[in-house]
Image (cartoon, rainbow, N blue to C red):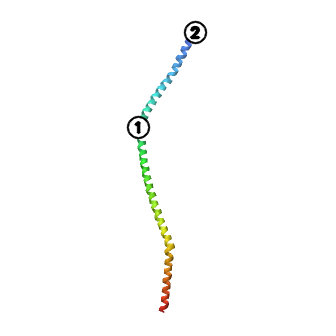
């Protein structure tokens, strides 16, 4: 036996041993690929309904937000009306306090004076 023959026999045995060791790995890779394929099919099946559901939910949220914005606008209008009414009441109370109240006090004083004068002459 020549050294080349011995080398070829050893190389052949190493290659066969390596192939025997790689067979379980290849089987495992094949099983993993099959599992991944199944997973991707399930994801494809579930993605469309989930996407539709998310779209419908986002549309509902947008609709609710539009309704809330309308209600906020209505509330702003009511608040503005209340503010205007309170400004009118404040202005009216200042008018009563500054203009009409002194006049009424003067009239009441004049009336009291006349009543006192009348009582004085009736006696």
Q: Which residue is mark 2?
A: 4
Question: Looking at the image, is 47 positioned above or below residue 77?
Answer: above
Query: Residue 106 placed where, x, y %?
Result: 50, 79
Q: Residues within 10 Å of mark 2 (few under 14, many from 20)?
A: few
The residue depicted at 43 percent of the width and 50 percent of the height is 66
The residue depicted at 49 percent of the width and 88 percent of the height is 117
Query: Residue 118 placed where, x, y %?
Result: 48, 88
Which disc is residue 48 wearing? 1
Helix, strand or loop under label 2: helix
Question: Looking at the image, is 87 positioned above or below residue 37?
Answer: below
Which residue is nearer to you in this view: 47 or 76? 76
Query: Residue 10 placed where, x, y %?
Result: 56, 13
The residue depicted at 43 percent of the width and 57 percent of the height is 74
Which residue is nearer to you in this view: 61 or 25? 61
Which of the 4 image quarters holds residue 78? bottom left
For the N terminus, the image quarter is top right
Helix, strand or loop under label 1: helix
Q: CA distance from mark 1 to mark 2?
A: 63 Å
Which residue is nearer to you in this view: 102 or 73? 102
Residue at the far top in the pictured view = 1
Question: Looking at the image, is 31 positioned above or below residue 104?
Answer: above
Residue 11 left/right relative to 80 = right
């Amino acid at each position: 036996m020549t050294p080349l023959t011995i080398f070829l026999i050893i190389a052949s045995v190493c290659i066969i041993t390596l192939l025997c060791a790689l067979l379980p790995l290849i089987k495992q890779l094949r099983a993993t690929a099959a599992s991944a394929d199944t997973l991707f099919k399930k994801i494809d099946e579930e993605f469309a309904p989930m996407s539709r559901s998310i779209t419908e939910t986002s549309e509902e949220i947008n609709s609710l937000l539009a309704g809330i914005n309308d209600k906020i606008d209505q509330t702003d209008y009511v608040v503005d009306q209340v503010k205007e009414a309170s400004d009118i009441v404040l202005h009216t109370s200042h008018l009563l306090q500054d203009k009409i109240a002194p006049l009424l006090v003067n009239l009441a004083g004049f009336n009291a004076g006349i009543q006192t004068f009348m009582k004085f002459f009736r006696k």
